[in-house]
Amino acid sequence: MYQTHSMGKKTRLLISILIPILITQLGMYAMNFFDTVMSGHASADDLAGVAIGSSLWTPIFTGLSGILLSLTPIISQLIGANKRENIPFSLMQAIYLAVVIAVAVMVIGGLVVNPILNAMDLSPQVQDIAYRYLKALAWGMIPLFVYNALRCFIDSHGQTRLTMIITLTALPINIIFNYFMIFGKMGFPRLGGVGAGYASAIAYWIITFIALFVIIYKQPFADYKVFKKLYRVSFASWKEQLKIGVPIGFSIFFETSIFSAVTLFMSKYSTIIVAAHQSAMNFASALYMIPLSISMALTIAVGFEAGAARFQDAKQYSYIGIAIAISMAIIFAIAVFLLNGQIAKLYSTDTQVRHMIKEFVIYAIFFQISDALGAPIQGILRGYKDVNITLVMTLVSYWIIGLPLGYILANFTPLEPFGYWIGLIVGLAVGAICLFIRLSVVQRRFRRLILQRKQLEC
């Protein structure tokens, strides 16, 4: 990151940070995408099993890895304030925290996954595939969480192109091992959807080792000599990261887990509806990578400017990012409407499943319109280190408004499964509006603080 002095230069810098983040997010998401798509070509049960497993895993991972996102504004503000000597310590504490989180996930997951699956109305085969898929995925938990800490460190320097390259390097390996393990090629056993879990775990290890190599040997990261000194665990540093990260993590968890909750409610429907719903949700998640990436780029840019106490620059980045997100949402909404049949063909060879996917995918258009406003604002607020109110807004919008409304529409109107999607859309829209109001409050408050600081200096 570096200071810019015009809207045009800010737009170019933000886009230069954004594009690699977007490609990186799509690359990370593509692992799950190919897990789902390739499993769907093994059988409908494999598709449903992997979809159920993913729906349980995704909110846990995104929520807990969201805690590690606190490292991005922390380091961005340290860079903006020219306090680089504190950065290696902060990174090492984040790595320690990542390992602890990963171990906790594996231990708790081992205790609760079976009871959760037993509570769902699934066929024995689908339940077995979902359980073994999650068990296979667990082999990659520690490197995956560590990689997220390393990635935040790299991205906070504006070097988002590096994480893009790392992720894209691992993606073909994931696809190749999917092919080997799902379909039993090149001497591997035919594991169906379960093989996708092992393939993803292998990819996570590769990503982490490459990131470590980059941080140790590539400039400007090598100058920090991060691993030359063994730092003790600092609970004070963990407290700082958790104070910012826990609200971020829970906010993301409340947003992503709402989709898993809907999947649990929809398990009463046929395997065809469950498979179609999860396929369409998988595609909607792919579209979400665009506003999410803009959000992450804005955290870096706004955090840098906020750390340097440049109010106007931070505000300009905010509205440039929102404008880009809304423009992209409109373009993709038109594309999805025109190509929903082709999208359905990606996920299944079953005619009935394809027909249902086409119907669900139309609702994904409305998801991305709300996300185009809500997700970037969340990133902006993280740049200001304002995270607690966002947590409350997310909880209320999704769980108190969106899910109950979806349940009523699904169970007491002819909409049935589509009612849940309408409830989610309303929740996302309410959340986006509330976040916009909060952003206005935070920007006014930040401006007052800057003016007061300048008056004191005079």
Image (cartoon, rainbow, N blue to C red):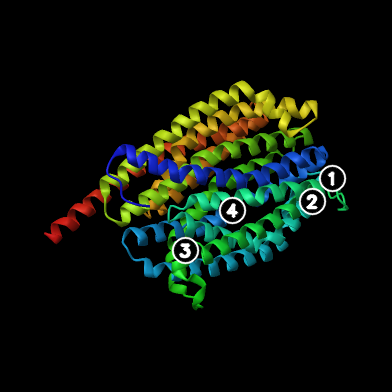
Discs 2, 1 touching: Cβ within 8 Å: yes
Cα distance in 3D space between marks 4 and 2 = 23 Å
Q: Secondary structure at mark 2?
A: helix
Amino acid type, label 3: Phe
Instruction: First in sequence, mark 4 or 3: give its number.
Output: 4
Mark in the foreground, 1 or 4: 4
Q: Is residue 416 visible?
A: yes
Residue under label 2: 195
Q: Residue lying furthest left in this view?
A: 458
Mark in the foreground, 3 or 1: 3
Instruction: First in sequence, mark 3 or 2: give its number.
Output: 2
Instruction: First in sequence, mark 2 or 1: give its number.
Output: 1
Discs 3, 2 touching: Cβ within 8 Å: no
Say which residue appears at 66% left-offset and 60% top-offset. 205
Q: Secondary structure at mark 3?
A: helix
Locate residue 100, reporting x and y percent: 59, 68
Say which residue appears at 54% left-offset and 45% top-offset. 255
Judge the density around disc 2: few (<14), some (14-19), many (≥20) Cα neighbours within 10 Å. many
Horizontal arrangement in the rendering, residue 2 relative to residue 282 (left or right)? left
